[in-house]
């Protein structure tokens, strides 16, 4: 079978989509055939030899479209190498990154059959001006993880491309 990679993503405000695009471009530059698609539009994994799945974290859980992707493609995903990445941390504080990893592991524990070859966390992008309802209410809620959070973009494009290159070698 020809090596064709699917890069599937969930994204609400576009920042995870941009990371997925960069990963797809890097895999392509490394000589691999790549399809880039929103996870909810993927009907079958029949033509793929590996999958990269990406999702942002919202209120302690990764995006439901990625959870839906795992449920829908359960059987096919047990037979393919899958690299998983999540976007979330909005600061460079080590504690926040550790906490996000704990949250991801908890969500992934709902899919005990899922054995990703990689789990990677990238910083996220946040702009309070762009938030739609109900997210725009959370910024005012003291108990919420984004309470009073300023705009930021902690995506490290060098690290993203370097991770994607390492996947190209792996796949
Ligand atoms: C309403 C809201 C809740 C969020 N909750 C979390 C969270 O619990 N943990 C976290 O690490 N990041 C959280 N984030 C940060 C997002 O994961 C980050 O902004 C990400 O880049 C968004 O991806 P998207 O643009 O693809 O939707 C939150 C962002 C918003 C707007």
Image (cartoon, grey):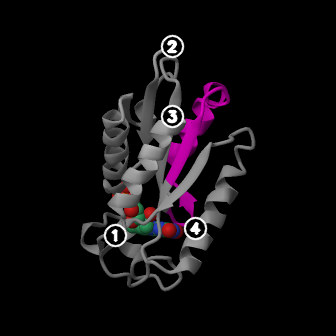
Q: Considering only order in the chain, which callout, 3 or 2, is on the residue closer to the N terminus? A: 2
Image coords of residue 32 (percent x, y): 39, 29
Q: Considering only order in the chain, which callout, 4 or 3, is on the residue closer to the N terminus?
A: 3
- Residue 102, position in %: x, y? 66, 66
Instruction: Kindly identify which residue carries mark 2.
Output: 1
What distance separates the C-alpha of mark 3 from that of mark 4? Answer: 22 Å
Please name the residue that numbered disc 4 is placed on: 100
Label 1: state its secondary structure. Answer: strand
Q: Residues within 10 Å of mark 3 (few under 14, many from 20)?
A: many
Which residue, given by chain and number where applicable, does mark 3 sit on?
51
Front residue of this view, candidates 22 and 29? 29
Residue at 55% x, 71% y is 97
Q: CA distance from mark 4 to mark 1?
A: 16 Å
Dot 4 beta carbon under 8 Å from ligand 1: yes
Q: Secondary structure at mark 3?
A: strand
Specify whether tag 1 is near ligand 1 (CB below 8 Å). yes
Mark pair 2, 4: CA separation: 36 Å
Tell me what residue is drawn at x 61 percent, y 64 percent: 101
User: Could you say which is closer to the camera, residue 32 or residue 114?
Assistant: 32
């Amino acid at each position: 079978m020809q090596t064709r990679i699917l890069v599937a993503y969930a994204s609400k405000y576009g920042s995870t989509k941009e990371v997925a695009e960069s990963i797809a471009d890097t895999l392509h530059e490394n000589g691999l055939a790549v399809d880039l698609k929103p996870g909810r539009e993927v009907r079958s994994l029949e033509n793929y030899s590996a999958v990269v799945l990406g999702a942002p974290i919202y209120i302690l859980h990764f995006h439901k479209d990625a959870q839906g992707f795992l449920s829908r493609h359960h059987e096919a995903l047990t037979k393919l190498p899958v690299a998983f990445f999540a976007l979330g941390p909005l600061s460079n504080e080590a504690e926040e990154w550790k906490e996000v990893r704990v949250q991801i592991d908890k969500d992934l524990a709902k899919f005990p059959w899922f054995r990703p070859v990689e789990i990677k966390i990238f910083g996220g992008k946040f702009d309070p001006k762009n938030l739609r309802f109900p997210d725009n209410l959370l910024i005012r809620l003291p108990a919420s993880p984004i309470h009073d959070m300023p705009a930021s973009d902690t995506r490290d494009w060098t690290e993203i491309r370097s991770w994607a290159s390492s996947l190209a070698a792996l796949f």
